[in-house]
Amino acid sequence: MTSFTSSSSESDGEFIARLYGEFKYIMLSTAKKYVDSPEDREDIVQESVVKLLDKASLLRGKEPPALAAYVVYTVRNTAINRLRHASVEKAHFEELDGDTEPEADTIPLDELMALRELKIHLDRLLSLLSEDDRTLLIGKYILEYNDAELARELGCKSSSVRMKLTRARRRALKIIARDEVLRRDEA
């Protein structure tokens, strides 16, 4: 993987073009998890590139593993938003047709607020972990990487990933336990 430190003469567009060249296959692979159509995958990746262009100054100088995670999350979120938008459009068209009743599969507001609060809490807890621990835990449990993929992300041997994961889980559990004690003390 190439270094993504950029010179002052490199424009945001050139930087993002270089980023796209490096992560194109990861981006397409991520989009493939959400849509079957190659055209839809390309659309999602293109939308993601536009979003990344807006964040070029934030992305410059990031380490390759952090950059890869940012790119993957951007594509994932773009795909999820696109699927949500498509389902909303479909529901509206069905309402206009009058043939079917709109589905009542929306999440109640109180559940949505609780989920949002939980996400904020988890994001805060994740930020307390080291970059390697975050990469391991997100890679294993969210991105569902295997040991070889995690080893490549961390630049270590595949045989040492299991021990690193065990230690990362222990550190994460300590942070969660400490946080729970603090929350109980505050209550």
Image (cartoon, rainbow, N blue to C red):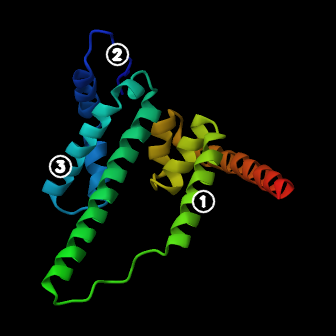
Q: Position of residue 73 (x, y in %)?
A: 40, 46
Q: Which element is circle 3 on?
A: helix
Which three-letter amino acid code belongs to the residue tagged 2? Ser
Name the residue tied to disc 1: 118
- Residue in the image at 33% along x and 59% along y: 80
Q: Which residue is mark 3?
A: 42
Which numbered tag is attached to residue 6?
2
Vertical placement of 9 versus 137: above or below? above
| Residue 108 vs residue 84, the one in the foreground | 108
Measured in 3D between alpha carbons, the distance from the residue under mark 3 to the one under mark 2, in whole angstroms, is 26 Å
If you read the primary sequence from the N terminus, does the residue marked by circle 2 or circle 1 appear first?
2
Check the image and report above or below for 158 versus 142: above
Please, what secondary structure does the residue beneath circle 1 have?
A: helix
Front residue of this view, candidates 156 and 173: 173
Tag 1: amino acid? Leu
Quadrant of the rendering where the N terminus is positioned: top left
Mark 2 closeness class: few <14, some 14–19, many ≥20 residues within 10 Å: few
**Which amino acid is tagged 3?**
Glu
* Residue 70 picture location, percent across and down: 41, 39
Q: Nearer the viewer, mark 3 or mark 1?
A: 1
Q: Which residue is drawn at the image coordinates 74% and 47% (left, top)?
A: 175
Left or right: 20, with 119 as reference point? left
